[in-house]
Image (cartoon, coloured by chain):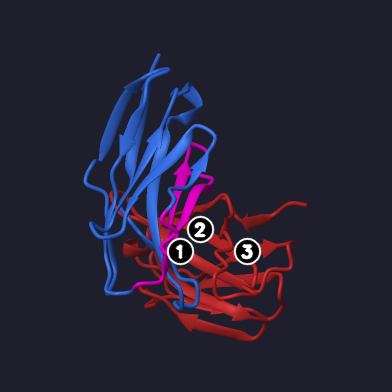
Amino acid sequence: AQTVTQSQPEMSVQEAETVTLSCTYDTSESDYYLFWYKQPPSRQMILVIRQEAYKQQNATENRFSVNFQKAAKSFSLKISDSQLGDAAMYFCAYRSADSNYQLIWGAGTKLIIKP
Amino acid sequence: NAGVTQTPKFRVLKTGQSMTLLCAQDMNHEYMYWYRQDPGMGLRLIHYSVGEGTTAKGEVPDGYNVSRLKKQNFLLGLESAAPSQTSVYFCASQLLEVSGWSYNEQFFGPGTRLTVL
């Protein structure tokens, strides 16, 4: 069975600086997708970025980018120029290419932005 | 376009009581999901549905039942609530993939905070 591990329960960063959140996963599959979701205090789960395993190029969405290391089964999220609105819980999730689209979730990392 | 809505937002139950959580989506999505979120843990899948009239068990289905009588609605029922079911419940929906390499996003509702005393 697949598992997703986020080893940092909490991270803090100064506003305008860069922070990296870690995620590792365990799978024997070769085709899968990886996601980072953000959950602000409002509880609404919002997709931040996604990566297809077959793509070598790292995904980027504005200030958010990933470092996808398939051999190491690592999928970290980098947030550049951190803003107060980035404060939230961040969840890493895995989906098999043939899983009926079920997501396997990490436990989350709480990101604190210091003004 | 309201997206995914959940009713109610908060609820307090006594042990043994029953209730139904309603999830509605207006995006014509085929797939719908019920998750629970507990402190220090990621979301765990309770039940899901791949289309109207179909449901399937997820990772933690015990104590819950679901129904998908209409495409836009997915109901989660607790027949006899227990304190272990105190949690935040999220509904999500997703469009049917049309290719093997698609990675359609799951859209989430705002959650329902349920407390069972």
Residue at point 41%, 62% (across, down): A53
Q: Which amino acid type is shown beneath numbered disc 2? A: Phe
* Marked residue nearer the N-terminal end (3 or 1): 3
Badge 2: residue crowd in 10 Å (few <14, some 14–19, many ≥20) = many
Pick the residue in front: A39 or A7: A7
Q: Is residue B59 visible?
A: yes
Determine contact: label 2, label 1, CB under 8 Å: yes
Q: Are marks 2 and 1 on the same chain?
A: yes
- Label 3 sits on residue: B23
Magenta-drawn segment: A30-56
Q: Position of residue B79 (x, y in %)?
A: 47, 76
Question: What element does badge 1 sit on?
Answer: strand
Q: Which residue position is annotated with label 2?
A: B90
| Distance CA(mark 2)–CA(mark 3) | 9 Å
Q: Which sits earlier in the primary sequence, circle 2 or circle 1?
A: 1
Kindly tell me whether residue B116 is visible in this rendering. Answer: no
Q: Residue furthest right?
A: B1
Q: Does the residue at mark 3 contact the one at mark 1 (Cβ under 8 Å)?
A: no
Q: Residue at x 27, y 35 (%)?
A: A10
Query: Quick one: label 2 or label 3, which is nearer the N terminus?
Result: 3
| Kind of residue at badge 3 | Cys
- Secondary structure type for disc 3: strand
What kind of element bears circle 2? strand
Residue that sits furthest to the bottom in the current view: B53
Q: Is residue B90 magenta?
A: no
Horizontal and vertical percent position of residue B3: 69, 54
Name the residue tied to disc 1.
B35
Q: How far, Cα to Cα, is label 3 from label 1?
A: 12 Å
Circle 2 marks a residue in which chain? B
As drawn, the chain in blue is A
